[in-house]
Image (tube, rainbow, N blue to C red):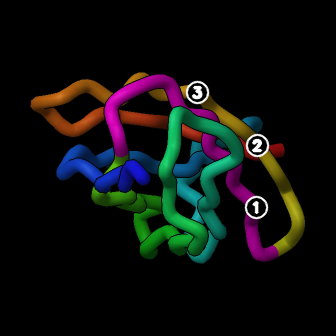
Amino acid sequence: MGVALMSGNSVQGRVVHASTGAPVADATIAVIAGPGPYPDIAVMTDDDGRFSLDDMAAGDWRLGARSANGATGEASVAVGSSAAAEAVITVS
């Protein structure tokens, strides 16, 4: 039986509002799809709309965001094996 281990790659990102470009605080970020395994938990953005997902496997991922008022958005991000990947999710 094989065991898939999480690697040490990370995604750093931020959530912004589509019409204003303003950062979106307290948005929920979740992994929608990816090469797996991936975290089964969501993270929240800080006051500057920033978030971090750690221990992501290398590959192409799809992330989703939902703001406190229900605005949603998605973004794709390619996670490599060295530097942190960057993602910007726009919600509307």
Q: Secondary structure at mark 3?
A: strand
- Say few, some or many: other residues with alpha carbon within 10 Å of mark 2 (under 14 / 14 to 19 / 20 or more): many
The residue pinned by badge 2 equals: 73
Badge 1 marks a residue whose secondary structure is strand
Residue shown at the point (27%, 48%) measured from the top left: 10
Q: Earlier in the sequence, mark 3 or mark 1?
A: 1
Task: Look at the numbered discs 1 and 2 and tell me whether their residues touch, using CB distance below 8 Å.
Answer: no
Q: Which residue is mark 1?
A: 66
The residue segment tinted magenta is: 57-68
Residue 76's tag is 3
Q: Is residue 3 above or below residue 57?
A: below
Are there few (<14), some (14-19), or many (20+) residues within 10 Å of tag 1? many
Looking at the image, residue 84 sits to the left or right of residue 82; the answer is right
SS assignment for the magenta stretch, majority: strand
Quarter where residue 21 is shown = top right
Mark 1 vs 2, N-terminal side = 1
Alpha-carbon distance for marks 1 and 2?
7 Å
